[in-house]
Amino acid sequence: MKATERHHLKQNEFAATTARVVGAAVEHRSRILPIAGIIALVLIVGGAFYYVQKRGADQASAALGSAMAIAQSPVVPPPTLPGATQQAGTFPTDQARLEAALKAFEEVAAKYPSDDSGLAAKYQMGATLLSMGRAAEAETAFADVVKRAGSSSIYKSVAELGRGQALASAGKYDEAIKTFTDLSAQRDGALPVDGVLMQLARTYVKAGKTQDARAAFKRVVDEFPGSPYTAEARQLLAGM
């Protein structure tokens, strides 16, 4: 596996955990949340493209679904035969796909600024920009979602997480650490605390704050013995 692929898998590890948690939340809250809220809850972590397709009559959701389809399109090397064209629905490089997805998410966010789908698109903009290494722009996108989302909204929590990751990627470690620390204190929040603690610990490592990193990793080991992160936290502790 290429180093860049390993990096993206690592970067998306916590997002996958968040998706599982949000999925469970949707299941248990489906009796009290309106349909639009359930769609938004799932879309914010990019896990319900097929669900949006089923409800394509909603123009905003359909537009978001189309943008997500672009983001999930396969990457196929360009044809080498003379006169041949790129296969429909594919992109020649990951960069080309990211750029196309970013443009699509921007259009949805601009067209439906007050809609849940527009808010989800703005979050996806931040995630895409972060994947492209444009941390400052990603931070701005995530911050906008945080500002516009309700205090109890899943959008707010996940966008705050994204903003913390963007801050860390930009080398703004103190701000990122504060963000992750605040999120880790939300025991009843939508995000898994063990995952947030791992983000916090890794940021401490990047900032050169070894003792603080050890303390965060130890919290994962001690407080979450059944966590999927525990083995990694214990291994990293042993090497520090």
Image (tube, grey):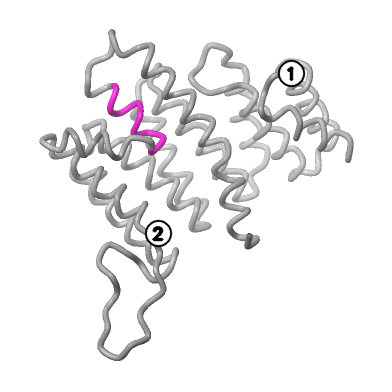
Say which quarter of the image contains residue 30: top left
**Residue drawn 75% across the image and 35% down it:** 232
**Would you name the residue on which mark 1 appears?**
225
| 92 over 65 or under it: above or below | below
Percent coordinates x, y for residue 76 in the rendering = 39, 68
Q: Residues within 10 Å of mark 2 (few under 14, many from 20)?
A: many
Q: Horizontally, is 1 left or right of 134 in the view?
A: right
User: Residue 27: which quarter of the image?
Assistant: top left
Number of residues whose C-alpha sits closer than 10 Å to that of mark 1, classed few (under 14), some (14–19) or many (20 or more):
few
The residue that label 2 is drawn on is 98
Circles 2 and 1 in contact, beta carbons < 8 Å:
no
In the image, which is nearer the foreground, mark 2 or mark 1? 1
Q: Residue furthest left?
A: 57
- Which kind of residue does numbered mark 1 sit on? Pro
**Circle 1 sits in a helix, a strand or a loop, which is it?**
loop
- In the picture, the quarter occupied by the N terminus is bottom right
Which residue is located at x 35 percent, y 26 percent? 41
Instruction: Residue at 60%, 50% (x, y): give it.
Output: 170
127 relative position to 117: left or right: right
Say left or right for 114 vs 75. left
Judge by depth and name the residue closer to the eye, 129 or 32. Answer: 32
- Residue 4 versus residue 209: which sits nearer the camera? 4
Extent of the magenta region? 38-46
Dominant secondary structure (helix, strand or loop) of the stretch shown in magenta: helix
- Residue 73 x/y as whole percent: 34, 57
Lower position in the chain sequence, tag 2 or tag 1: 2
The image quadrant of residue 24 is: top left
